[in-house]
Every structure is written in structure tokens, then in C-alpha cells.
């Protein structure tokens, strides 16, 4: 037998779910002779690409990792004292390995199906409890994108909640001591909605200015000062002014909480609780507030309810606040959170507990005090009086100091006045680091002598006396074995891609390959501050350059911005680009956004946030945009038309034949076309946003380009734009700077009013490249797939969807198809007839799927009473068949109700899901067998996933809102009763 040396691993073969023989069987089921024939029947000829994608040849996994190591080595990991809200930290190894590097955590979806998400819901409840305890507030949400975004959300909420005496007020005061990236983003977010921003010294602000409705303060301040805001907040409240405070969680273990000072909102970042800096992210921001604002708080809230057996169970609370329901009436477009990072930060607090967290904070403060004392002894002027971890030092020769610091591979914060330097300490620093730091300043000191005399010397009102983190969860799991077992107990409650396909329509839950994930935790990517000088980040810059070029080739656009750190932020960024473009042409009156009925809920919410007015366009009976209605509304609003927001393929799972005509209509009336990139997984290599006529789109890198969903975040939403929009891409105060500096003047005395947008209108994320460290994942995916592989992935995704459609025919009706009866990469199946015929709701089907080991497809979006199925290209035929068999079996169970064989009220669907506790109970009085309940098909017995709770009563939880950890005896009482 001859030997061959030609074999080489192909990543594409590992990413796609199908073998050649399986694909042939599927094509036969679909009724075509080849996959190209299916594509010709699905994708309109007028929009197909004329040439294949021009991307580098694909690399094997080993080749990629070796080459990427070389790229990573171009990043220089300097010791960071930069502060400004980002700190080096130790990620406990038990958290690193069992959460961040664990696919059971990072491949899960947002916990809409709460019965199979109790583990991360509990972890998020821990996070909320941690935040509300440390901030001294009544409740907290389950995380936001970054601290600057959270501050902007606070501004929006306080503006929306102005009291009657302040309804005409429109000025938001921002302390000049806030972090510069926060000030930058506040200006961006305030401008389009008519809020005036006044930046100044909070110690001299004139609160009697009747136009001020809210304040934003930093605690501790960006320069390190710790101010007591109690009196200022009390004075503001007397005048009907509300107050938001951006705070540091570690500092709050020692400092009086903002809640005790009277704050209305507290925001910040939990990054330093064990989450790497990652050149800007991803990190979990937090938002805490008073109970009075619980129905206005942005983002997700985890609350405690009860299940059908009366057992405590968690789920996302008060969902009627969210953008997908409130649409253009929403005050926020937040569509996701930073769940994976919030889980890490909350687990950091669980692992360390209150005593160890306080000890870490005392050590950080102690090192800062040693450094400050030594510098003062040497004659340096330390201008910060009360401080936690940051001091500001006045120096005579900044350039000389820079050279010395650079030689020692140390980054300090250099202020724009070329006289002051900031130094921030964190938990990774030691006394040896202080000695090294003093060497840079040309001085020495007896540090042991200074350390022996250390004590907290803040004013008494600033020293925290209240308790925090008293719940047992923060006082139990402090050995690694205990923590490991606790994390494992949470993990086992959640269904993720490690168990089965998650066929959520419009969510693209595809493979997150291990090779793509490995570089995320390399220190060359994780230990870099977002404001580090660019010449220390050449590896990152090469990554950005390559990724920009590749995404431009894929989209057909002229340029990309990698800054937006979620899909919703990408939407907002794209609309702000359009706004700036119109204003540059003297068309500031163009503020009408046409949005189809079927659009994602974030679309209208984002449009309103960008200062636009939403006009809804009808869809026809086939689910397509009603072109006649679009034309009529474009004519009606021609003079004021800003844009059309369109998803393509449509949210109904169809390649609309009229898409080019639709885009042309908008252009004829002077508007721009924004394409929502949620369904880009059906475009790559076959068509492109530019080809259909779009001017800007965002890409969900956490969908099409393999960044995992993380249980509800992180994500990335970069935007691509056509040539005319390139000058208006998002800016950032650090992008053109070789050193992190406060922007000129820090806008300390500036007041910006609506309409004053620069060409590059400002930041949309706290960091210049958003959540930069996870861009490595999408980079890896494209590098290992190559152009042909990416195109084949799109074709396979379309085949997989049409295969499921064919398998379910005769059991379920597919609501919408294209001209040739084909679905795109997803399809909507209609479950509404079952309610009339059998009293079965779509929710019953979703819960019953759990008994078969599956997460439900997208429920009741975009059409109520339906499910939207998207299998992606990564699932094997065997897995698709397993899902189809489950759906067919459920249809037969519905038929049993329809025919009267099963009871209309007490049946296997109405009682789903079935837990082990229910199945093993001594009493079984249900009109179907235990086996039917929990082992409905043979394959289930071999691979059973047990939901940990029965169906949850969401209404009960909203009526009795509990958003922090409940006493452990609540669980014990239920066990005793059982």
C-alpha cells in the first residue's frame, strides 16, 4: 500500500457539521442536485457577488496558533500604573479555567429560557448582590458594556425621570474629575437628544442654575482625590437635581458607599475583580440605583420567583422594560450585557469574600501610601490629599521621567499640562514595584519604615463602617475545592452548546472553536491597558489592520470601525455616522428613520437615541417590506429623510428580491441605508451589504464571526461604511496620541449643545477599540477558514435551514419563504393554530423541548406565537435530525390534545419541563407516564439533560421583585416541605 504525505488538517472540515455523504442525503431531502443549485434558488441573482472573496489562504489550527504567537509577541506588556478605570488584576486560576476557558459557560445563550439557565442566573444574582452591597444601593442590574456607557445610561435615565420642577431642564453637569473616556462618551450620547453637557469643578458648580437636572461625579476621582459628596448630593436633591456617581468597587470595601452619601445612581466597572484589561475589554460594567427607579433601570435584571412546585427559581425580571418590547419608546437600546465577565467578577467576590477583598484593598491603599510618602520625603509634590489607589505628582522634567519609565518598561499617566503624572496601584503590585518606581523618580526611601507606620487617615465620614457581602455565598467557598465544586454545581444547571444545538433564529449560535479561543487568555493580549502607547501594541495594530481589511472585503465597504462593543452599540454608531454625514452637508433637519415592522427592537430604540424620529414601514403578507408603502413614506418625508434601517436577509428569514429597489428609493430621496448585520451569516461570500446598496452596517462578531455569546455577552458590533461616510466614523481621545493624556483642556469649561458634532463625532465605547481582546477570536476564524471556507459556511447554513424546513413539512407550516419556496439561513414556523385547536401556546413547546434536551428556538419574534429556527453551519446532520425528531414528537403530542387523547389542561406540554425531583416523587398523579415525561425518545435516555427547576412563574417574580441573593433557608424550607 502506497503512503501519501499530502494529508493536511483543514479547519473548515472541523467547523462545518456535515460530511460529503450527509450533505448528499440532505440535498436529496431538500430536492436539489447540488448545494449551488439551492443557492441559486435562494439568493437573488441580482445581488450575488461577481467574484469570490479575496482573502488569505486558510491556515491550519497549528499554523495559525504559531503565526499568531509571533503577532502577539509584537505587543509589549509594560507594568501599568495608568489607572483611569483599568487595572491589572489576578484572575484566580479556578475562575480562569472553570469559567473563562470553559465552553459550558462561554457557549451558553442569554437566559431567556430560565429553567435551563439557573446556574448563570445564580451567578448573575451574586454579581447584582455584590454591586448593590458595595455601592449601598437598593438594586443593581446584571451588567452593562463599560463604565462610560453605564454613565451615559445614567444620564439618559435621569433625564427621562426629571421631576415636574425640572421638566424643562436640559443640562447635565459632569465633574472634570471624571475619567476622560467617560466625559468623551457623555458628549457623544448627549448631543443627539438635546442634552447640554457642562463640564466643571463640582466644588464650585452653581446648583441654582435651573437648567441643571443631573450631576455625574467620580469616586474616587480620576486624579485620585477622594471627595465626600454627601453635602453636595443633599443640596442637589433640595433643588430637584438627581446625582449619579461613578465608583470603584474595590475602593468601596474601605470607603463610605455612594448610597450612604445619597446617590441616586452608581455606575462603574467590575474589571479589577479578576477580569484582564484586554486592551479595553470585555469587562462587566455595573448600574445600581434606588428602588424608585427599578422600572427604568437599563439592561437586564435577574430576579427571584418561584417555579410550579413552589421552589425558588431565578429569571430575568421586568422584561417589559426592554428595547425588544418598548422599541421606539425605550430609553435605552441595550440588547445584551457582559454576562461572562459579570460571572467572573461575581465569582471573584465569592472566592475572596468580604475579608479578603478588604485585605486586598488595604494592601493596594497601603502600597499607594508608601509610594506617596516616599515621594513626599524626597521633595516631590504629591497633589492628592485623600486617595485610595491613585496619586498625582507634580514633576519638573516630564520628558526625562518618560525616558526613565520607558527604560524600566513602566507606563505612567502623563497629563496634558506636561507637569503632572498619575500613578495608580493595583493588586498585582508589590513593595519591590514601589522601589522600582522610586528609582524612576531618582529617589530612594526606607520603605519598611514607612510601611510600619501605615494607617488609614481619611476623614471619619469617608471611612466605611457598614457591612457588605454578608450572604453565605460570599462567606463559604474560599478554598479551591469548595469553589471548584460550587462553580461545577452552577455549570451543571445550564444547557449550552456542549450539550446540544441551540437553534435560536437571528442569534447564530455556531461553533466557538477551541483554537479560536486559546489566544484570548495570552498575557500579550490580556495584560495591556487600553491607553498604552501604540508603539507597545504593534501586535494589536496589525490585528486591527488585517481584520479591517478582511471585513471590508467581506462587506464591500471602504472602512471599518472596531470600536462598538455590542451589536446595539454598532447600530447606534452607524446611525451617528449617518447623522454626522447629513449635518456636514447642511442637512441637519434630516431626522426621519424608516424602519420595517419586522425590525429588531434595537433598531427603533437606537434611532431614537441618535436623535431620529421613527416612521414604521409595513410588511406585506409574505413578510417582505411593502415597497409601495416604503415609496409613499419616502415621498412623504423626502426633505427630512435620514435613513432606512433594514435587516438582510429579512428577520423573516427571506432574501427579499426587491432589496436593490428598496435601497435605490432611499437614495433617491437623499437618505442613507443602514443594514442590520444580524443575519450576515447568510451573506458572507454570496452577497454583501455594499452589493445590495447599503451605506453602513454593523456586524455581530458574536454571531457570524464566532465570538461566543457567553450566556448573554460579551459581543462586538463593528461598523463598515461606504466611501462617503468614512470621515464620520467614531473617534476617541486616545487614538492619535502616543501617550495616554487627558484631552486638551479636558473640555472642563465646554458646553456642547445639540447639533455641534465634529466630523468624527466622538466615542461610542470607553476604549478606542472596544472589547479588543476578543477580536482575536474573529481574526482566528477568518484566518483559518479563508475566503472559500467562509463562503462554504454560508452555503451550508442555508442548506441546514432548508433541510430542517423540509423535515418539518407536514408537521409545521413555515410562515415565510422566498420566491422559489426557500428559506435563507433561518425560518419561522407557525405555532398559532395550536392555541385554538389544543390550547397549546408557543411557550409550552419551548418548555417541552427542554425535556428532549434542547434549548428552544427564538420564541415569538418577530411574529408572536411562532418560533424562529436557525441551525447554523456547524451542526451535523445527526444533530439536525435529533432536533427534527424532537419537534415532530412534540407535534404528535399536540395532536394527542387535539384528538382528546390527552387532557387539554393537564398534559405533558403544559407541565413541561419535568425535573428529576418531579419524576422521582412518590406521588405521580399526572395522566401520562413518568417515562413519557422525561424520556420521550430513545436518544434522550442516553444523553439526558435535567432541568433544575420546573416552569417558572415570571409574573409572581415581577410582582414580588427580589434582585439579590435570597436567604439559604428559603431553599431549605422547600426541601423540607418536599
Image (cartoon, rainbow, N blue to C red):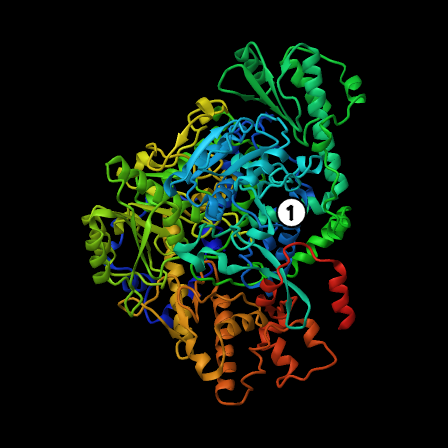
Q: Position of residue 94 (x, y in %)?
A: 69, 46
To which residue does mark 1 refer? 132
Q: Position of residue 763 (x, y in %)?
A: 43, 36
Q: Quadrant of residue 623?
A: bottom left
Towards the viewer: 295 or 533: 295
Q: Is residue 600 above or below residue 133?
A: below
Camera sees residue 241: yes
Q: Position of residue 459 (x, y in %)?
A: 71, 28
Q: Is residue 717 above or below residue 528?
A: below
Q: Is residue 464 left or right of residue 391?
A: right
Identity of the residue furthest to the bottom in this view: 900
Label 1 neighbourhood size at 10 Å, few (<14), some (14-19), many (20+)?
Answer: many
Count of residue discs: 1
- Classify mark 1: helix, strand or loop: helix
Q: Quadrant of residue 131?
A: top right
Towards the viewer: 211 or 117: 211
Amino acid at each position: 500500500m502506497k503512503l501519501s504525505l499530502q494529508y493536511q488538517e483543514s479547519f473548515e472540515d472541523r467547523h462545518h457539521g456535515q460530511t460529503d455523504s450527509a450533505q448528499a442525503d440532505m440535498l436529496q431531502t431538500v430536492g436539489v442536485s447540488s448545494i449551488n443549485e439551492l443557492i441559486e434558488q435562494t439568493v437573488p441573482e441580482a445581488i450575488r457577488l461577481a467574484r469570490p472573496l479575496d482573502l488569505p489562504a486558510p491556515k491550519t489550527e497549528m499554523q495559525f496558533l504559531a503565526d499568531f504567537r509571533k503577532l502577539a509577541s509584537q505587543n509589549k506588556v509594560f507594568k501599568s500604573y495608568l489607572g483611569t478605570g483599568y487595572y491589572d488584576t489576578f484572575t484566580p486560576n479556578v475562575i480562569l479555567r472553570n469559567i473563562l476557558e470553559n465552553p459550558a459557560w462561554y457557549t451558553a445563550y442569554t437566559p431567556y429560557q430560565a429553567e435551563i439557565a439557573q446556574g448563570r442566573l445564580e451567578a448573575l444574582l451574586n454579581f447584582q448582590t455584590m454591586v448593590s452591597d458595595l455601592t449601598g444601593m437598593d438594586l443593581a442590574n446584571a451588567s452593562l458594556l463599560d463604565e462610560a456607557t453605564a454613565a451615559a445610561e445614567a444620564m439618559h435615565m435621569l433625564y427621562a425621570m426629571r421631576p415636574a420642577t425640572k421638566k424643562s431642564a436640559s443640562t447635565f453637569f459632569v465633574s472634570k474629575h471624571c475619567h476622560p473616556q467617560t466625559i468623551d462618551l457623555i458628549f457623544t450620547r448627549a448631543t443627539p437628544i438635546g442634552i447640554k453637557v457642562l463640564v466643571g469643578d463640582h466644588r464650585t458648580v452653581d446648583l441654582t442654575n435651573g437648567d441643571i437636572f443631573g450631576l455625574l461625579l467620580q469616586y474616587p476621582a480620576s486624579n485620585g482625590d477622594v471627595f465626600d459628596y454627601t453635602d453636595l448630593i443633599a443640596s442637589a436633591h433640595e433643588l430637584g437635581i438627581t446625582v449619579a456617581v461613578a465608583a470603584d468597587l474595590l475602593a468601596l470595601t474601605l470607603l463610605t458607599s455612594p448610597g450612604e452619601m445619597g446617590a441616586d445612581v452608581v455606575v462603574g466597572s467590575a474589571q479589577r475583580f479578576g477580569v484582564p484589561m484586554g486592551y479595553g475589554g470585555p469587562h462587566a460594567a455595573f448600574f445600581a440605583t434606588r428602588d424608585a427607579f427599578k422600572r427604568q433601570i437599563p439592561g437586564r435584571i435577574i430576579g427571584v420567583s418561584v417555579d410550579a412546585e413552589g421552589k425558588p427559581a431565578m429569571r430575568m425580571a421586568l422584561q417589559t422594560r426592554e428595547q425588544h418590547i418598548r422599541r421606539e419608546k425605550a430609553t435605552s437600546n441595550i440588547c445584551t450585557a457582559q454576562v461572562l465577565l459579570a460571572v467572573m467578577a461575581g465569582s471573584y467576590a465569592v472566592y475572596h469574600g468580604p475579608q479578603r477583598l478588604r485585605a486586598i484593598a488595604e494592601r493596594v491603599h497601603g502600597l499607594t501610601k508608601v509610594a506617596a510618602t516616599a515621594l513626599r520625603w524626597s521633595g516631590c509634590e504629591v497633589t492628592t490629599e485623600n486617595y485610595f489607589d491613585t496619586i498625582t505628582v507634580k514633576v519638573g522634567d516630564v520628558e526625562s521621567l518618560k525616558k526613565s519609565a520607558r527604560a524600566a518598561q513602566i507606563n505612567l499617566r502623563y497629563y496634558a499640562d506636561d507637569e503632572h503624572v498619575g500613578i495608580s496601584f493595583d493588586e498585582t503590585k508589590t513593595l519591590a514595584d514601589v522601589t522600582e518606581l522610586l528609582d524612576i523618580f531618582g529617589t530612594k526611601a526606607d520603605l519598611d519604615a514607612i510601611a510600619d507606620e501605615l494607617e488609614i487617615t481619611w476623614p471619619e465620614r469617608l471611612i466605611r463602617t457598614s457591612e457588605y457581602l454578608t450572604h453565605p455565598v460570599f462567606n463559604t467557598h474560599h478554598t479551591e475545592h469548595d469553589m471548584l465544586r460550587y462553580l461545577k454545581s452552577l455549570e451543571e444547571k445550564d444547557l449550552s452548546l456542549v450539550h446540544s444545538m441551540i437553534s435560536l433564529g437571528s442569534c447564530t449560535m455556531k461553533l466557538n472553536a477551541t483554537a479560536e479561543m486559546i489566544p484570548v487568555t495570552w498575557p500579550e493580549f490580556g495584560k495591556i491597558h487600553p491607553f498604552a502607547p501604540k508603539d507597545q501594541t504593534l501586535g494589536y495594530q496589525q490585528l486591527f489592520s488585517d481584520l479591517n481589511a478582511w471585513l471590508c472585503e467581506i462587506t464591500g465597504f471602504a472602512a471599518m470601525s472596531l470600536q462598538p462593543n455590542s451589536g446595539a452599540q454598532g447600530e447606534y454608531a452607524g446611525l451617528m455616522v449617518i447623522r454626522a454625514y447629513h449635518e456636514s452637508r447642511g442637512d441637519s433637519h434630516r431626522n426621519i428613520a424608516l424602519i420595517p415592522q419586522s425590525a429588531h427592537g434595537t433598531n427603533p430604540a437606537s434611532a431614537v437615541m441618535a436623535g431620529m424620529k421613527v416612521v414604521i414601514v409595513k410588511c406585506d403578507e409574505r413578510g417582505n417590506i411593502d415597497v409601495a408603502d416604503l415609496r409613499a413614506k419616502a415621498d412623504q418625508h423626502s426633505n427630512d429623510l435620514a435613513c432606512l434601517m433594514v435587516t438582510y436577509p429579512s428577520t423573516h428569514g427571506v432574501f427579499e428580491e426587491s432589496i436593490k429597489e428598496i435601497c435605490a428609493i432611499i437614495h433617491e430621496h437623499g437618505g442613507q441605508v443602514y443594514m442590520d448585520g444580524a443575519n450576515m451569516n447568510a451573506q458572507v461570500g454570496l452577497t454583501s451589504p455594499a452589493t445590495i446598496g447599503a451605506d453602513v452596517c454593523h456586524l455581530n462578531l458574536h454571531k457570524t464571526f464566532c465570538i461566543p455569546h457567553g450566556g448573554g455577552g460579551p459581543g462586538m458590533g463593528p461598523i463598515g461604511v461606504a466611501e462617503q461616510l468614512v470621515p464620520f466614523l467614531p473617534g476617541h481621545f486616545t487614538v492619535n496620541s502616543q501617550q495616554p493624556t487627558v484631552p486638551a483642556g479636558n473640555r472642563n469649561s465646554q458646553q456642547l449643545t445639540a447639533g455641534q458634532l465634529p466630523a468624527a463625532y466622538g466615542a461610542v465605547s470607553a476604549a478606542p477599540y472596544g472589547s479588543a481582546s476578543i477580536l482575536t477570536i474573529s481574526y482566528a476564524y477568518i484566518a483559518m477558514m479563508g475566503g472559500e471556507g467562509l463562503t462554504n459556511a454560508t452555503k451550508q447554513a442555508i442548506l441546514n435551514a432548508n433541510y430542517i424546513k423540509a423535515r418539518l413539512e407536514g408537521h409545521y407550516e413555515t410562515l415565510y419563504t422566498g420566491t422559489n419556496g426557500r428559506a435563507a439561513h433561518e425560518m419561522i414556523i407557525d405555532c398559532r393554530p395550536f392555541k385554538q385547536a389544543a390550547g397549546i401556546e408557543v411557550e409550552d413547546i419551548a418548555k417541552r423541548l427542554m425535556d428532549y434536551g434542547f434549548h428552544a428556538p427564538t420564541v415569538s419574534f418577530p411574529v408572536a406565537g411562532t418560533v424562529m429556527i436557525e441551525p447554523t453551519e456547524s451542526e451535523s446532520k445527526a444533530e439536525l435530525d435529533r432536533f427534527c425528531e424532537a419537534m415532530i414528537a412534540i407535534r404528535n403530542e399536540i395532536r394527542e390534545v387535539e384528538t382528546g387523547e390527552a387532557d387539554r389542561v393537564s398534559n405533558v406540554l403544559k407541565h413541561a419541563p419535568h425535573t428529576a425531583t418531579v419524576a422521582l416523587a412518590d406521588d405521580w398523579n399526572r395522566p401520562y407516564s413518568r417515562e413519557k415525561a422525561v424520556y420521550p425518545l430513545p436518544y434522550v435516555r442516553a444523553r439526558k439533560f435535567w432541568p433544575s427547576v420546573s416552569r417558572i412563574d415570571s409574573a409572581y417574580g415581577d410582582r414580588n421583585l427580589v434582585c439579590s441573593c435570597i436567604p439559604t433557608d428559603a431553599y431549605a424550607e422547600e426541601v423540607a416541605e418536599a
